Every structure is written in C-alpha cells, then in structure tokens.
Image (spheres, rainbow, N blue to C red):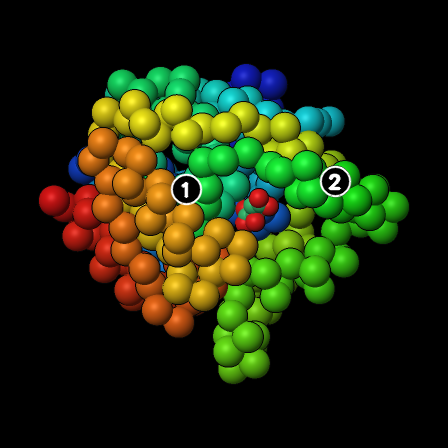
Amino acid sequence: MQVRVNDIRMGYDDFGSGNAVVFLHAFPLNRRMWEPQVSRLKERFRVVVPDLRGFGETESPPGPYSMEMMARDVLGLLDHLGIASAALVGLSMGGYVALAFCRLRPERVSSLVLADTKATPDTPESKAARDDMVRQVQNCGVDFLVETMLPRLLTQKTIQSAPQVVQRVADMIKSTPPAGAVGALLGMRDRPDSTDVLRSLRCPLLCICGAEDAVTPPSVAEEMASTAPNGRVRIIPEAGHLANIEQPDEFNKALMEFLSS
Ligand code: MLT
C-alpha cells in the first residue's frame, strides 16, 4: 500500500488487528527485512511496516534525511491509519528513527524495542566514513554496498552456510535508490545524541542484540537498557547485526514475550 505523507509517497504494509506494533528497518534495507517477524506477529497484533524515506516503495527525494524527518513520516503514517499509540521496533537505523520518534511524540509510544542499535551519535571517524560512502554511492551506485556491508550485517557462519539469507539481504541492498542511500547516510551522520531520550523514556524498553554483532555489540545494548528507567536486554546467540533475520525464532520469542507482558 502507499499513502502521501509530508512531501513523499510512502510504501507500507498493515496486517492483523489489536495493539499496533510498528517495525522500522535498517540501512540500506527496506520493510521486507521484517518478513520473519510480520508472519508471526500479525496473528496477535496489528503490524505496521513502512519503508522509510529513500527505501523500498517509498519515494527518495534529495536528502539529507534527518532521523527526525523520518520519524515525522512515521508519525504521518500513524495519523493516516488512526493509530493513537504503538509499540515501536527499530533495528539499527530504524532504532535511530524510533528514538527520534520518542523525542518527538513520547505519548504515542506504548513500548520500545531497540535492536542492534545505539543512542550515541557518530564519532568523527564514523562521520568521515559516511562521507566516503556518500562519495562512492554518488560515483558508483549502491552495488558496492553489498560487498562492504554484508560482512558487517551477517555472521561469517551465515555468509558461508545460508546463501538464501545472503541473497535476500543483497537483493534489498541493490534495490535501494542511490539518492535514498545518500539521504540516509547524511542524516545518520548528523543525528543527535539520544541518550537523553533513553534517560527520560516513559515506556518499557527491550534492547535486543545479536551476540556477534560487531557494529553495535551487546555491551551497547546493555548500556542502553541500564540507562532507561525500565529497560531490559536480550542477547541472541549465533546472530550478528541483523539478528531478526539470522535467528528469527529467538528474535520473535523475545518480541512476543516483551510485547505480551
Ligand atoms: C544499519 O544497519 O542500519 C546501519 O548499520 C546503521 C549505521 O550505519 O549506523
């Protein structure tokens, strides 16, 4: 489905009924990364899954896309769907957007799941790496991101033994429009520190992290959970940065337990 939100047309799915759960995807992927969660959770919840600005079936106007801008798109979608409050589940970049949403409209968030993400901003080194990546995307398109990103997103074991998973992730990366990748990279580069949002979080927080996530390791998830007034953490064995894709059953179990409690 598509809807006009702010200055873009936004692609999304809306399945099931009951309390709403909104899934926010990682960079440089799209809403299809949540398929293993959608199929399970739609039995119990209303599951809303947007493509963030620049990705999937959502338009990609010139960037930068600040995390707040992406959060405002999600807010526009919830308004359109008549959803007063929802559980937000954000993985990596989706987590940055979820935190931006909490800063904007805390009263619209019933609970928060931050997976394989962090609240702190980019370091000077990671800002420089973003700028390099922007230049490469502008010069060569997004295909090179498959080679650079896959070893960061998936464990070595998955890369060697699960070709269908690798293919799914690679296909999502390759389908990202260059303008979308650039817009999001610039927005992530300049995102603010959200530690204050965590500190004043009014809703329950679950931090999920792949035990082998080298991008945002378990220590980061533990730190975030202990910063929030009501936070807990779940480490998923044998998973890297895309814990929801590598270990969907464990990930879904953690989500179901938290969202049902
Ligand atoms: C992601 O998975 O969304 C990215 O690793 C986030 C980032 O580059 O900071």
Q: Quadrant of the C terminus?
A: top left
Q: Quadrant of residue 15?
A: top left
- Residue at position x 55%, y 75% in the image: 156
Q: Amino acid at mark 1?
A: Gly
- Residue at position x 50%, y 75% in the image: 158
Around disc 2, counting alpha carbons within 10 Å, would you say few (fewer than 14), some (14 to 19), or many (20 or more)?
A: few
What kind of element bears circle 1?
Answer: strand
Name the residue nearer the viewer: 65 or 2: 65
- Residue at position x 24%, y 56% in the image: 254
What kind of element bears circle 2?
Answer: helix
Say which residue label 1 marks.
90
> Is the CB atom of the residue marked by disc 1 within 8 angstroms of ligand 1's nearest atom?
no
Q: Residue furthest left?
A: 261
- Image coordinates for residue 83, horizontal then vertical, percent: 29, 24
Around disc 1, counting alpha carbons within 10 Å, would you say few (fewer than 14), some (14 to 19), or many (20 or more)?
A: many
Q: Quadrant of residue 113?
A: top left
Say which residue label 2 marks.
128
Q: Quadrant of residue 188?
A: top right
Q: Is residue 100 above or below residue 89?
A: above
- Residue at position x 83%, y 42% in the image: 135
Q: Is residue 66 above or below residue 260?
A: above
Sequence-first disc among 2 and 1: 1
Q: Amino acid at mark 2?
A: Ala
